[in-house]
Image: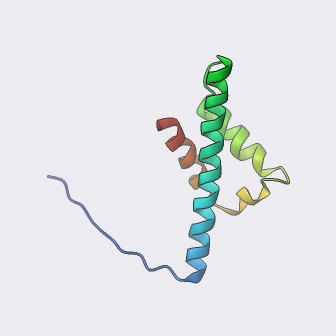
Amino acid sequence: MQLRYSFRLYPNIAQRTALAQAFGCARVVFNDAVRAREDARKAGAAFPTAGELSKKLITRAKQTVERCWLAEVSVVVLQQALRDAEAA
């Protein structure tokens, strides 16, 4: 027997902003991961591992001026986006 719980969230303005920021960052990392895998496939190379993608798309990207805003959200959100891209 499986149980299912259903919850409705009513976030306030600050929470909505934080959620939108987290979702946006996750979308960017997900798209970058899919693009990296597609580039590797086109080049005939092996797919990058999750560790390589994490270093490249999260750790190093946070240190660049163009993607420093990735540091404003939890790294868990970004790592889950990588796992989701790998499963896709």
Q: Residue at x 57, y 60 (%)?
A: 23
Q: Position of residue 15 (x, y in %)?
A: 56, 76
Name the residue at 66% across, 33% down.
Answer: 36
Picture layout, residue 24 above or below residue 87: below
The residue sitting at 77% across, 43% down in the picture is 60
In this view, the residue farthest toward the right is: 65
The count of marks equals 0
Quadrant in the picture for residue 77: bottom right
Note whether 51 is above or below 75 in the view shown.
above
Q: Position of residue 21 (x, y in %)?
A: 63, 65
Q: Residue at x 62, y 19 (%)?
A: 46
Measured as percent of width and height from the top left, residue 87 is found at 47, 37
Task: Give the vertical position of 42 relative to 9 (above or below).
Answer: above
Q: Nearer the viewer, residue 49 or 38?
A: 38
Q: Residue 54, located in which quarter of the rendered image? A: top right
- 88 relative position to 72: left or right: left
12, 88: nearer the viewer: 88
Seen as rendered, the residue at the extreme front is 42
Model colouring: rainbow
Q: Is residue 62 left or right of residue 42?
A: right
The quarter of the picture where residue 17 lies is bottom right
Image height of 13 relative to 22, above or below: below
Residue 10 relative to residue 53: left or right: left
The extreme bottom residue here reads 12
> Depth check: 56 or 20 in front?
20
| Outermost left residue | 1
